[in-house]
Amino acid sequence: MTKNKVGLAIRELHRSENDLAAELLQASSRHKAEHDIFYLGRDLARWSQDHVRELARHGKNYDVELDAEPHDEPRLLATVRQKGAELIGGHHDPALLLLKDLREIHRKAAGVSLDWEVLAQTAQALKDSELLALTKACHPQTLRQLRWANASLKANAAQIMVTP
């Protein structure tokens, strides 16, 4: 039963990392003019994609088969989201969309961070040194993603909100 619970935690973290990578890539694509968002967003997404690969590799130890390749956003969904972003941008300040995207990245990164913490505590309790090493390698990068989203929000929020 313990193996199944750990497998479920790995599966959920794998899904969450995929979602975070997709959110970072989507925000990066929508805000190409914001160089910090575009380039750093892509770099930070690669970290989550690497985590997806590592989780898939380690999931086998817990009888969990996961796709080692990060999920690409399906083209149709990407097109729908892009059209939605264009419509929103046409009626609202595109900077508000940036705030929305940064808030979503922050929320997702916070959730991923909590999942890494659960997995780290589990690895310690099980004395699984390989799983613990994985959490020690990946969790700090997630914390960096979280800090980046928070710093970007702080750097942009006031100007976006008070500029007519």
Image: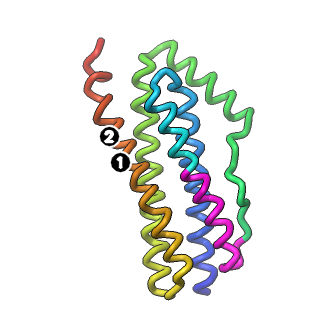
Figure check: 97 above or below 87: below
**Which residue corresponds to mark 1?**
147
Majority secondary structure of the magenta segment? helix
Task: State the residue at coordinates (62%, 58%).
Answer: 52
Question: Start and end of the magenta stretch?
Answer: 47-64
Q: Secondary structure at mark 2?
A: helix
Q: Where does residue 63 sit, x and y in percent of width and height?
A: 71, 78
Residue 17 lies in what quarter of the image? bottom right
Residue 51 lies in what quarter of the image? bottom right
Residues packed near mark 2 inside 10 Å, few (<14), some (14 to 19) or many (20 plus): some
Labels in figure, total: 2
Q: Of the residues shown, which amino acid type is indicated by label 2?
A: Ala
The residues tagged by marks 2 and 1 sit, at their Cα atoms, a distance apart of: 6 Å
Q: Of the residues shown, which amino acid type is indicated by label 1?
A: Arg
Q: Secondary structure at mark 1?
A: helix
Report the side of 42 relative to 113 (left or right).
Answer: right
Q: Judge whether residue 124 is colored magenta.
A: no
Report the side of 67 relative to 114 (left or right).
Answer: right
Task: State the residue at coordinates (32%, 22%).
Answer: 160
Of residues 46 and 110, which is closer to you in this image? 46
**Which residue corresponds to mark 2?**
151
Disc 2 to disc 1: CB gap under 8 Å: yes
Q: Judge whether residue 54 is colored magenta.
A: yes
Task: State the residue at coordinates (62%, 66%).
Answer: 55
Of residues 130 and 163, which is closer to you in this image? 130
